[in-house]
Image (tube, rainbow, N blue to C red):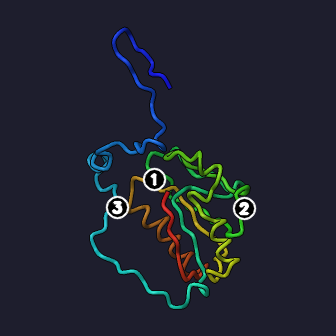
């Protein structure tokens, strides 16, 4: 693509596609967020060891949890306009097909994921692993939420605790696969 001439002496290059140039996040973004919104970034200083599987992988039920904002087209849309974020989550039936789903998210480009939802929400890949008996099966529901929020304490008390309770008590998952968007 040719550069556009601005005025008589300054040349402005066209903006590159951030997916190709690797420039989606500007340098210093996290520092700026922490300065403008103190305590908004979740940090963890304690080491939490990984849990050992209690049984073989091909006997385990797997639950997918993602911050990509995917939900059924028939569900109530997520609140993408609230300045502090949406503090709800959606259950996504593990048997859903891509045609049943929509990405309700404004905070990241999802053009590629609109073509193949598995880029950010690997539902079909997990369905295949279950049908091939590589994993024991899938929980009845997966979970999705909008990862953007500016109130980590509220997020933890609502979204995180709600999903954790549902995964453990309702879905009774052996494994939770976390897929950040």
Asked which secondary structure carries label 3, the reply is loop
Number of numbered discs on residues: 3
Q: Where is residue 104 in the image (x, y as percent from the top left)?
A: 59, 50
Which numbered mark, 2 or 3, is in the foreground of this view? 2
Please give the residue where the numbered disc 3 appears in the rendered image. Answer: 42
Q: Where is residue 32 in the image (x, y as percent from the top left)?
A: 29, 45
Would you say 42 lies left or right of 102 here? left
Q: As displayed, is residue 145 above or below residue 108?
A: below
Mark 2–mark 3 CB contact (< 8 Å): no
State the mark number for residue 148. Answer: 1
Q: As displayed, is residue 177 above or below residue 18?
A: below
Mark 2 or mark 1: name the one nearer the start of the chain. 2
Which numbered mark, 2 or 1, is in the foreground of this view? 2
Asked which secondary structure carries label 2, the reply is loop
Q: Is residue 24 visible?
A: no
The residue located at (36%, 8%) in the rendering is 8
Q: Is residue 114 visible?
A: yes
Instruction: Classify mark 3: residues with Cα within 10 Å, few (<14), some (14-19) or many (20+).
Output: few
Mark 3 or mark 1: name the one nearer the start of the chain. 3
The residue located at (70%, 58%) in the rendering is 98
Mark 3 and mark 1: Cα distance apart in space: 11 Å
- Residue found at the far bottom of this picture: 55
Please give the residue where the numbered disc 2 appears in the rendered image. Answer: 97
Asked which secondary structure carries label 1, the reply is loop
Q: As displayed, is residue 123 above or below residue 61?
A: above
Mark 2–mark 1 CB contact (< 8 Å): no
Mark 2 and mark 3: Cα distance apart in space: 33 Å
Mark 2 or mark 3: name the one nearer the start of the chain. 3
The residue located at (39%, 56%) in the rendering is 151
Q: Position of residue 96 (x, y in %)?
A: 71, 64
Mark 2 and mark 1: Cα distance apart in space: 25 Å
Residue 172, quarter of picture: bottom right
């Amino acid at each position: 693509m040719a550069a556009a001439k601005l005025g008589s002496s300054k040349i402005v290059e066209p903006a590159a596609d951030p997916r190709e140039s690797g420039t989606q996040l500007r340098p210093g973004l996290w520092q700026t967020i922490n300065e403008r919104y103190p305590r908004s970034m979740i940090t963890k200083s304690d080491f939490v060891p990984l849990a050992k599987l209690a049984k073989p992988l091909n006997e385990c039920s797997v639950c997918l949890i993602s911050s990509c904002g995917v939900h059924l087209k028939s569900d109530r849309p997520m609140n993408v306009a609230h300045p502090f974020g949406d503090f709800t989550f959606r259950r996504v039936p593990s048997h859903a097909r891509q045609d049943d789903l929509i990405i309700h998210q404004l905070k990241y480009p999802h053009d590629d994921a609109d073509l193949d939802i598995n880029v950010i929400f690997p539902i079909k890949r997990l369905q295949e692993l279950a049908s091939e008996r590589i994993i024991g099966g899938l929980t009845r529901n997966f979970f999705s939420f909008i990862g953007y929020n500016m109130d980590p304490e509220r997020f933890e008390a609502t979204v995180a605790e709600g999903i954790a309770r549902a995964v453990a008590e309702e879905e009774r998952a052996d494994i939770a696969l976390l897929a950040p968007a």
